[in-house]
Amino acid sequence: MNLKGRSLLTLKDYTKEEIEYLINLAIDLKTKKKQGITGDSLKNKNIALIFEKPSTRTRCAFTVGCIDEGGHPEYLGKNDIQLGHKESVEDTARVLGRLFDGIQFRGFSQETVEKLAQHSGVPVWNGLTDLYHPTQILADLMTLKENFNTLQGLKLVYVGDGRNNMANSLMIGAAKVGIHCSIIAPQSLWPDESLVEECKSIAQNTNATIVISDDVADVKDADAIYTDVWFSMGEEDKAKERVNLLKPYQVNGDMMQMTGKKETIFMHCLPAVKGYEVTEEIFESNQSVVFDEAENRMHTIKAVMVATAGDH
């Protein structure tokens, strides 16, 4: 499959087959890495890593993945370039596109990453915006496949803040690959209705279902329960209000038992605030695959870079 030159701004832009190709490539690259085999598909290539927001997993995953494949990653923090301040995003994109072979952007505005892709002429990868987090979803799908050997027909339940970038992106990714996805959240934190309808439309092609609910009993039959922090970067002032609102949606032993399945796994994109969205008990339990997900960020990001910017 040829994805050369493609950007990854949201998984809406990728077909079921393309997403599965990236996951299978990531699994293959992971197997090789465990055997001490790395590649050279990014040899003599330079990758720009733009970060408006701080990062652990995304920055490290792009850096290690790039070096593993023989490339040079260049970190550009918010104080290193003039993105949208002294220089327009369009002009910055045209400069970076002449110097680099690929650009990662992690920041606030989805519009910024789209402008970078439109004007740079090289693949641009969304490392997180306020709307979407596609590289995280690829890692999550890879982790699900490792645990269940399939994606089609699984039931994934997300509980907590249903209108953040993780809930948005999980709905898209699940709908694309045929996973039944339920978002369980208080009604005031339900995802945008237009996105829900769009995901339902996508899901019709893969025999998946999208359910939005405020009832935690709907975790029944879940193969995976997923949560995220109750307030995102920049929302710390809403902490007390969110804690009161979301307390009933905490992932704990009782909720895991409500699935009726011993095999149910617990997922989280990290960092986690233990004692809030998840108890220490579940976070540290054998059901938790959060560190597999964290590692798989690197393998899936490497797969994206290899497939879209690499020579292979």
Image (cartoon, rainbow, N blue to C red):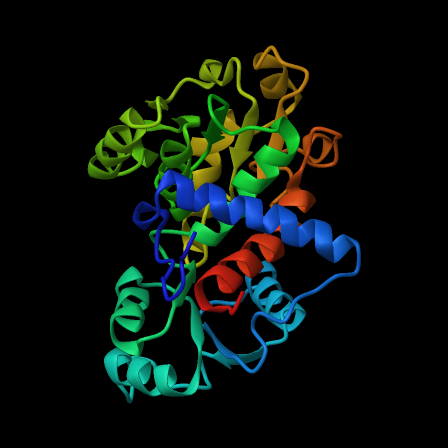
Q: Is residue 274 above or below residue 89?
A: above
Question: Can I make out residue 269 in this image?
Answer: no
71 with respect to 215 (left or right): right
Residue pictured at 44% horizontal, 44% vertical: 19
Q: Is residue 238 above or below residue 244?
A: below
Residue pictured at 50% horizontal, 64% vertical: 305
Q: Position of residue 299 (x, y in %)?
A: 61, 54
165 with respect to 30 (left or right): left
Q: Residue furthest right?
A: 35
Tally the marks.
0
**Front in this rendered view, residue 122 or 179:** 122
**Front in this rendered view, residue 87 or 300:** 300
- Quadrant in the picture for residue 124: bottom left
17 with respect to 57 (left or right): left
Q: Position of residue 43 (x, y in %)?
A: 59, 78
Residue pictured at 31% horizontal, 76% vertical: 121
- Quadrant in the picture for residue 58: bottom right
Q: Is residue 57 above or below residue 52?
A: above
Residue pictured at 37% horizontal, 22% vertical: 214
